[in-house]
Image: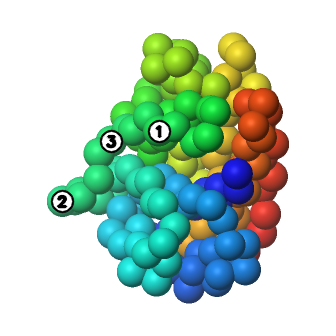
Amino acid sequence: MKVAVFSDTHSNTALMLEAVRRCRPDAVIHLGDHDRDALEIRGEFPEIPLYNVCGNCDLMPLAPNKLTVQLGPVKAFLTHGHIFDTGFSRVSPIVDTLVYAAQEEGAQIAMFGHTHQPLYEQVGGVQVLNPGSSGKGRNPTWAIVEIFDNGGIICSIKEL
């Protein structure tokens, strides 16, 4: 299973839509800021399952703050990350609380955005992925998550 993961598009959706066109994923995840950007994916690719959460810049959100979904044999914990932000500018406080929440849900992978910094690491038995900012900054990024039948996970961060 191949999953395309985006975050922090902030209404700049053209590159995200082009990446989905090229990648042809089995599912798409949008991790907020702006959750309505996910509706463009749904409109353009109605046949592809879409999972999305809202972010801190979503004033009247359509999506939940967090979501746990089954992606093949793997359980994934999705959030924008702002609800796990302890007020520090470093990424690690978000990751620590995020990993705990993912463990509580029995998830093997936790995905978040918010920091605009791509990240992929394993912490406490949970794979942690931040695809970076898919709509802002000089080098917008996104991620591809490959999930295998045996539960194996490979993540790669790509430039848009």
Question: Disc 1 or 2, which lies upstream in sequence?
Answer: 2
Left or right placement of residue 20 versus residue 80 in this view: right
Residue with the mark numbered 2:
60
- Number of other residues with Cα within 10 Å of mark 2, as a class: few under 14, some 14 to 19, many 20 or more: few
- Which labelled disc corresponds to residue 69? 1
Going by the numbered disc 1, the residue's amino acid type is: Val
Q: Nearer the viewer, residue 98 or 154?
A: 154
Work out whether residue 91 can be spotted.
no
| Alpha carbons under labels 2 and 3: distance apart | 12 Å
Secondary structure of the residue carrying tag 1 is strand
Residue 156 x, y percent position in the rendering: 81, 52
Position of 125 relative to 18 (above/below)? above
**Mark 1 vs mark 3, CA separation in Å:** 13 Å
Residue 14 x/y as whole percent: 56, 85
- For image coordinates 57% across by 80% down, the residue present is 17
Query: Left of 88 or right of it: where is 154?
Result: right
